[in-house]
Amino acid sequence: MVYAIDNISFAYDSFNILEGISTQLTKGSFYGILGPNGCGKTTFLDLLIRHKKPNSGRITFSGTDLSKISRKQLARKVALVSQDFYINFPYTVREVVIMGRYPYISRFSSPSSKDLDRVDSIMEKTGVERLSDNFITELSGGERQRVVFARALVQDTDVIILDEATSNLDIRHTIDLLDIVRKRVDQKKLTVISVFQDINLAARYCDRLVFLWNGTILAQGKTEEMVNKGLIKKVFDVESEIRFEPLYNASQVIFKRGAHETL
């Protein structure tokens, strides 16, 4: 068991964001977190990486209370790719990717040759090696996102958390990067926990889906069981049809037009 989440709740002042969330996230699975805007998806991820603390309930990571794990220890186990990464200092792309090795480097020490070899390998695999000497402040949003993705892979963690990590990417780079993490789930038993807005991408890549709705888990289970038009109607209030796509070996959602037209 990677994460065990037991009856957690979170609120800003008196406004409840999440309430009574319980689930277990196991090693070697790709999880998709879905739900309408404002349902608590990003807050849920923030709790998993200790950016926020639950008001009640308990989260354990590999059997240890999450609150008792140091930031540096957690950085060796969990990497984050956020949707709004921003650095206001003109580091080069290579310098930003090297930051992914910091949890393993002693204070006042420099990256080893092994660290730098790892950085070069990941930059090549993610297609950002040509940007190596560019300043991160001068890149497009999509280019920055790819650099942050490379930095997360360089961390060599057991878990990668993606918060709408492909939101700024074109479809080619979206597929390329999701293919990389899917391959690592299959071959290296990586655990991926990803917020998706696109249910068809989630259906293509994820083993299990968790649907959040009004701050609670409405449904969770195997992807093939969760992709059904009744649940999609309940969560997103849209009509749909489900078709199996042999090319992906996965179900895909076809949304109906005009469901809310009133004019």
Image (spheres, grey):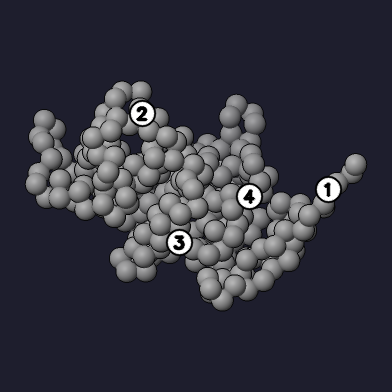
Residue 221 percent location from the top left of the image: 57, 65
Spatial separation of the CA atoms under disc 2 and disc 1: 41 Å
Residue 224 percent location from the top left of the image: 59, 71
Categorize mark 1 by other alpha carbons within 10 Å: few (<14), some (14-19), many (20+): few
Which of the marked residues, 2 or 1, is nearer the chain's N terminus?
2
Q: In the rendered image, which residue does mark 3 sit on? A: 30
Which of the marked residues, 2 or 3, is nearer the chain's N terminus?
3
Which of the marked residues, 1 or 4, is nearer the chain's N terminus?
4
In the picture, measured across the screen, residue 224 lies left or right of residue 76, that is right
Q: Secondary structure at mark 3?
A: strand
Going 82% across and 52% down the picture, which residue do you hit? 259
Q: Nearer the viewer, residue 120 or 231?
A: 120
Spatial separation of the CA atoms under disc 4 and disc 3: 17 Å
Visible residue check, residue 111? yes
Q: Mark 2 and 1 residues: CB-CB less than 8 Å, in contact?
A: no
Q: Between label 2 and label 1, give the one nearer the viewer.
A: 2
Q: In the rendered image, which residue does mark 2 sit on? A: 138
Q: In the rendered image, which residue does mark 1 sit on? A: 260
In this view, the residue farthest toward the right is: 263
Going 37% across and 69% down the picture, which residue do you hit? 186
Q: Secondary structure at mark 1?
A: loop
Q: In the rendered image, which residue does mark 4 sit on? A: 35
Spatial separation of the CA atoms under disc 2 and disc 4: 33 Å
Quadrant for the N terminus, please. Answer: bottom left
Quadrant for the C terminus, please. Answer: top right
Q: Between label 2 and label 4, give the one nearer the viewer.
A: 2
Residue 247 percent location from the top left of the image: 53, 73
Which of the marked residues, 3 or 1, is nearer the chain's N terminus?
3
Instruction: Inspect the image, locate mark 4, and give the three-letter code of the amino acid beneath it.
Output: Gly
